[in-house]
Image (cartoon, rainbow, N blue to C red):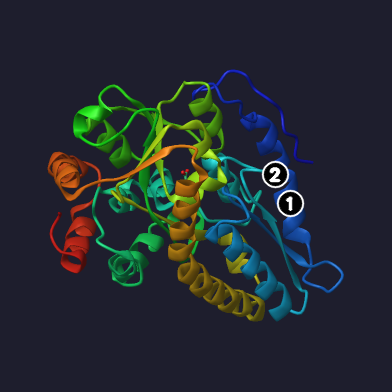
Amino acid sequence: MMTKTKHHHTEQYGAERRTLTRWIAGTFAMAALAAVKPASAQAPIVIQFSHVVTAGTAKGKAALRFKELAESRTGGKVRVEIYPNSQLYKDREELDALRLGAVQMIAPSLSKLASLSGGDFEVFDLPFLFKDRVAFRAVVDGPVGTSLLKKLEPHGVKGLAFWDNGFKVFSANRPLQWIDDFKALKVRVQASKVLVTQMTTLGAQASVGPLTSVYEALRSGQLDGQENTPINIETQRLHEVQRHLTVSNHGYLAYAVIVNKPFWDKLPSDIRTALEGAMRDASTYENSIAGAENTKALERIKTSGKLTVHTATPQELEQWRTALRSVYKDAQGWISTETLTALNALNGPPP
Ligand code: LMR
C-alpha cells in the first residue's frame, strides 16, 4: 500500500514532500507483488509510468500513445498505467522509485539524470549548445546517445529512447534583456550543476526544486524567475504568476525514457520485443509533435495578455553567449572529456 504523507521540513523552497521512508516501505511491497505476477490474460504485466508534466504536453501525449500501442500489440498482456503531473512522485523521487521498482518506467529530463550516473548527462544543459532540433537529434541518435544510456545500466536502469521537448525561455518578475537584469534574481533551475553555473554566471541566484512547486514559489515571491519550454510554462500556468518572458532559446530540454532494468530483463522476450516496437513508434510521434506544441504554446502565452513577451535581440543574445562561454570551461570539471570531445566532433566547437 503506497502511503502519501505530508512533511513540513524540506530543502526545496518550502514545498511539502512525501516522506521517503513511507514510500520506500510501499515500494518494497509493490516490487514483491510485481515479481510474482504471471503474464497471463487474467493478470497482465503492469507498467507504471510516472512523469511530472501534464497529459497535454508532448511527453504526456506520447506516454498515452505508448500505452495504447503497448496494450494493443501485446493483446492485453501488458497494462500501462500513466501517472502524469507529479501525481505519484516529484522530480527526484521518481528516479529513486524507478530504481527501487515502485514504478517501472519514467521519462525524466536529461538534466536530472546526472544525479543517477554522474555529470555526463548535463552536457545537454550547456547554454546555446544546439542551433536547432536536428543538431540535438544528431547527438542523441548516434554513438553519444547510445554510450550515455549505457552509463545508466550499472545503476539498474535501462534507457529506451530520447524524447524532445524544446528550447527554453526565461520568465521573471522584471524584464530580462541584458545580463545586468539577472542580478540577484532568484531563479528556479532543474537539478543540474551546469544550470546552476549558468545562473550564477549571469549573476542570478540558482534555486533547485521540483517542477510541481514552481508555480507556488513564483506566486508567493519565494522565486523571482524560472527557465523552461513554452509548453511546460503554459501547462504549469507559470505565465500567470510572472510579469515578463524573454524568448531566448538559450538551452534545450529533452528526456530519456528509462525503465527498471531487472524488470525489463525479466520480461518474456516476445513481450519485450512488442514493447520496444511500441516505444519506437511512440518516440517517433513524440519527436514529431514537440516542436509544434511549443510554437503553439508560445503563441497562446503571447495572446493570453498575462505577461509581456520580449524576443531577445541578436545583440542581447551575443552578450549572454559571450558571458556564458565560461560555463563550458567550468563543466570540464564534472563532464568527461570523452563525452565533451565526442559532442564537439558532432556538434561543432562551443558557441
Ligand atoms: C522541469 O523540471 O522543469 C522539467 O524537467 C519538467 C519536464 O519533465 O519537462
Q: Would residue 337 appear left or right of 125 to someone viewing this image?
A: left
- Can you say whether 129 is above or below 161 in the image? above
The secondary structure type at the circle numbered 1 is helix
- From the viewer's side, name the closer residue of 328 and 313: 313
Q: Are discs 2 and 1 less than 8 Å apart at CB?
A: yes
The quarter of the displayed image where residue 67 is located: bottom right
Q: Is mark 2 within 8 Å of ligand 1?
A: no
Q: Amino acid at mark 1?
A: Ala
Count residues near mark 2 (Cα–Cα under 10 Å), then give few for <14, some for 14-19, many for 20+: some
Question: Percent x, y for residue 61?
Answer: 60, 63
Query: Which numbered marker is on residue 28?
Result: 2
Q: Amino acid at mark 2?
A: Phe
Q: Which quadrant holds the N terminus?
A: top right
Residue at the spot 18% in from the left edge and 42% down from the top edge: 316
- Can you say whether 252 is above or below 342 in the image? above
Q: Which quadrant holds the C terminus?
A: bottom left
Question: Percent x, y for residue 31?
Answer: 70, 51
Residue at the spot 29% in from the left edge and 34% down from the top edge: 176
Q: Would residue 89 appear left or right of 199 to someone viewing this image?
A: right
Question: Percent x, y for residue 250?
Answer: 28, 48
Circle 1 residue: 32
